[in-house]
Amino acid sequence: MEILPLSTSNNTTVAASHSLPHAYAQSTKTLYQDKAYQDKDCQGRLLASFQDDAKYKNVGQDTRSQDGKDDDVVEVSSKGMVSTRKVSRRHLLKSSGLRPRDIRSVDPSLWLTNTMPSLLVRENAILLNLGSLRAIAMQESVFIFNFNRRGGKAFIDDLLPRLNPKSMIGGGVVMPFELEVVEAALNSRIQHFEHRLMDLDPHVQDLLKVLPNRLTAGILEQLRICKQTLVELGSKAGALRQMLLDMLEDSQEIRRLCIVGRNCILGNNSNVECSVPLDKQIAEEEEEEIEMLLENYLHRCESCHNQAERLLDSAREMEDSIAVNLSSRRLQVSRFELLLQVGTFCLAVGALVSGIFGMNLRSYLEEHASHLLEPSVLLESNISYRVVQHGTQTFLAKELS
């Protein structure tokens, strides 16, 4: 067997092999046989690892195929055209220029975890997460996820009239499509809060008027449901208010909102730099409009939050008064129970004393000693019944008066 090292040619290798001593050649042969065995073992391990990699690769492909399934969305164009289509995540990322982590904020499959409202501004898109409304707004269209839910339907009903050309005749400055989408989303969400408060306010007021005089299980259950609804509504309005406050305090976020879809960037000093001077002027004007817009919806959201807190405080005060009333009645019942126990104890002591002193006395009028047992028991029972009846009538008379 001839050894062919990689660093020499075939002729040099043959000559060197003939000139080697026999012992050296034998040891070299053994060494290379061991190396070949080790190479075979290494090849086996590599083959097993390649098989494992292929297995995990298939698992990853299956996962990607499940994660990359098409989503049913409603697409509303800037011209007001509405269409339902299937959009894959990969196509959505390419068309909007978003990153996979951006999609998580509007992913409809994560609606249980992504409950906090958010408005993410990216270079070519705006991601909206407002409760049941999940949408991605771009320069020419908006994709709406979960369009069958109440938030999605209310958003579409609010957005379409804004895109109608007839509604823009005689109006002011036409806003960009992305800002129209943001305004429609905020308006539909806050209108939902306002409508729920308008329905809850008279119902809570009626319960507060009825409760001091009628403490029934049904009315108390209605108060509990109203209180739970107010807590949920107040927390949602408070979260939306905090989001609007954070946006108003961040001037860079507002400027990013102005330059979405334009050939503009933010400089080092957070100044808008555009390739076209007209775009810079329009962006500066829109910055003031966006601030006024966010201020308006912030005031409306604060009004909803304050009203929900006011109704919730009224319900809690009524619960406190109900608890005090129930405690007073519980005290009266405990007092009456104590009176009954004292009366029973007095009767028992009287019976014990009479029994001790009279058990050995005989009048010799009875034929048998046990004949007086029955009238004694009947008399004592009658007296006890009269005492209990009188105490009950007195207690009920005080309660009714």
Image: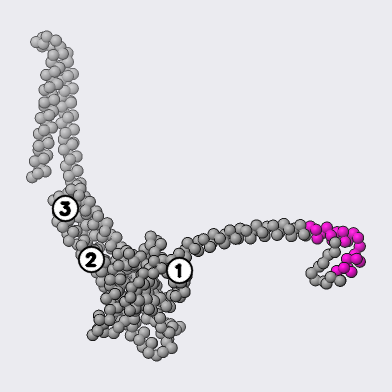
User: Where's residue 188, x and y in %?
Assistant: 28, 70
For the point 15% across and 50% down, which residue is it? 214
- Image quadrant holding the N terminus, namely bottom right
- Precedes in sequence: disc 3 or disc 1: 1
- Residue under the image location 35 percent in, 65 percent down: 146
Secondary structure of the residue carrying numbered label 2: helix
User: Which badge, 1 or 2, is on the more N-terminal residue?
Assistant: 1
Q: Please, which residue is most extreme toward the bottom here?
A: 277
Q: Quadrant of the C terminus?
A: top left
| Left or right side of 364 for 317 | right
Q: Which quadrant holds residue 11?
A: bottom right
Identify residue for label 1: 89
Q: Please tell me how crowded label 1 is: few (under 14), some (14-19), or many (20+) other residues with Cα within 10 Å.
A: some
Residue bearing the label numbered 3: 211
User: 58 above or below 388?
Assistant: below
Kindly check if marks 3 and 1 are in contact, taking CB atoms under 8 A apart as contact.
Answer: no
Kind of residue indicated by mark 3: Leu
Gap in angstroms between the C-alphas marked 3 and 1:
54 Å
How is the rendered protein coloured? one colour
* Amino acid type of the residue tagged 1 in the rendering: Arg
Q: Residue at x 44, y 72 (%)?
A: 92
| Distance Cα–Cα, label 1 vs label 2 | 35 Å
Q: Which stretch appears magenta?
A: 12-34
Identify residue for label 2: 195
Discs 3/1, front: 1
Residue 269 at x, y percent in the picture:
43, 83
Q: Is residue 165 magenta?
A: no
Residue 365: give its label: none
Q: Is mark 3 on a helix, strand or loop?
A: loop
